[in-house]
Image (cartoon, grey):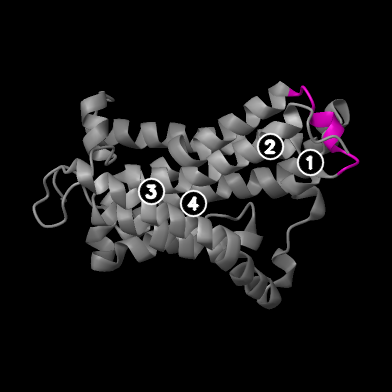
């Protein structure tokens, strides 16, 4: 036990990982090709089916978190969930006491994440794809195609799609991936992985991206160094959530002009 949090075996960690990764992979590579035609044909927006399917997979992760906590604690009270999922004020690594000043650590880690997304990740993923070229992103899966001059007009006033993006962002960086990996798994991995639990957590986080394998390499690095490390260091999943959510804020702001009709091709 680490405080009131039980420790998982390697097998159990991998089992929880599979319950998150496999559905996302199936939705992305098996279900999406089947439903993409009808859904996208009806909307005229080529990535809408994938967005909906990814949202379903992330909502499942949130449900999985609740199921695991219900089984572990026998109840789902907020005070208990806060402690078990590390949804607490960052704690000083030496004293273990809450210290609000530690929130400032989110700033440098967020800036490092921005640097990673802009500079490190593209180079790392390019190297990854040289080794595994069959993991390259299919053009029709890229969100960038939404902003292509011949398609961007379809976004003007399509607030239902912007709402989907915001929901996707919420479950991606708060209620889904982060809550599962930094809230459930990370606090329960020390027994199996010792002081390197944050590294193992980042590796699993990267490999979880079966639905977008072109970004596995950068997801491993970001997951370990920028999401798991501060969360483990200060025993607060909020640090990983805050840093990862910078990505959601960025995409929300970048896409907003298109939905306002200010990026006509």
Residue visible at 26% across and 37% down?
72
Q: Give the CA distance from mark 3 to mark 4.
A: 21 Å
Considering the numbered disc 2 on the image, is that residue within a helix, a strand or a loop? helix
The reply to whether discs 2 and 1 touch (Cβ–Cβ < 8 Å) is yes
Q: Which span is picked out in magenta?
A: 149-158
Q: Which mark is residue 146?
A: 1
Q: Is residue 131 left or right of residue 46?
A: left
Please tell me in which quadrant of the rendered image residue 124 appears: bottom right
Q: In front of the other: label 1 or label 4?
A: 1
Q: Which of 261 and 141 is in front in this view?
A: 261
Q: Residue 18 carries which label?
A: 4
Considering the numbered disc 3 on the image, is that residue within a helix, a strand or a loop? helix
Q: In this view, does 46 lie above or below 161?
A: below
Q: Give the CA distance from mark 2 to mark 1.
A: 9 Å
Q: In front of the other: label 3 or label 4?
A: 3
Q: In front of the other: label 2 or label 4?
A: 2
Per the image, the residue denoted by label 2 is 255
Q: Which of marks 3 and 1 is nearer the N terminus?
A: 1
């Amino acid at each position: 036990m680490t405080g009131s949090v039980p420790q998982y075996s390697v097998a159990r960690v991998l089992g929880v990982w599979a319950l998150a990764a496999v559905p996302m992979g199936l939705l992305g590579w098996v279900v999406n090709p089947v439903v993409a035609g009808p859904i996208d044909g009806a909307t005229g927006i080529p990535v809408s089916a994938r967005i909906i399917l990814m949202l379903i997979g992330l909502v499942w992760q949130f449900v999985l978190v609740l199921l695991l906590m219900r089984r572990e604690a026998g109840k789902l009270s907020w005070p208990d969930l806060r402690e078990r999922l590390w949804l607490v004020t960052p704690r000083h690594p030496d004293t273990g006491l809450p210290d609000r000043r530690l929130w400032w650590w989110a700033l440098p880690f967020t800036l490092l994440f921005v640097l990673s997304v802009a500079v490190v990740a593209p180079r790392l993923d390019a190297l990854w794809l040289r080794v595994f070229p069959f993991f390259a992103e299919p053009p029709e899966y890229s969100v960038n195609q939404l902003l292509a001059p011949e398609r961007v007009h379809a976004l003007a006033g399509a607030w239902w799609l912007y709402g989907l993006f915001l929901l996707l962002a919420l479950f991606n960086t708060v209620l889904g991936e982060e809550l599962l990996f930094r809230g459930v798994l990370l606090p329960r991995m020390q027994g199996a992985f010792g002081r390197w639990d944050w590294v193992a957590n980042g590796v699993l986080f990267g490999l979880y991206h079966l639905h977008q394998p072109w970004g596995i390499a950068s997801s491993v690095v970001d997951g370990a160094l920028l999401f798991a490390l501060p969360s483990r260091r200060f025993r607060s999943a909020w640090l990983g959530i805050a840093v990862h959510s910078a990505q959601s804020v960025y995409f929300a702001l970048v896409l907003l002009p298109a939905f306002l009709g200010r990026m006509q091709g």
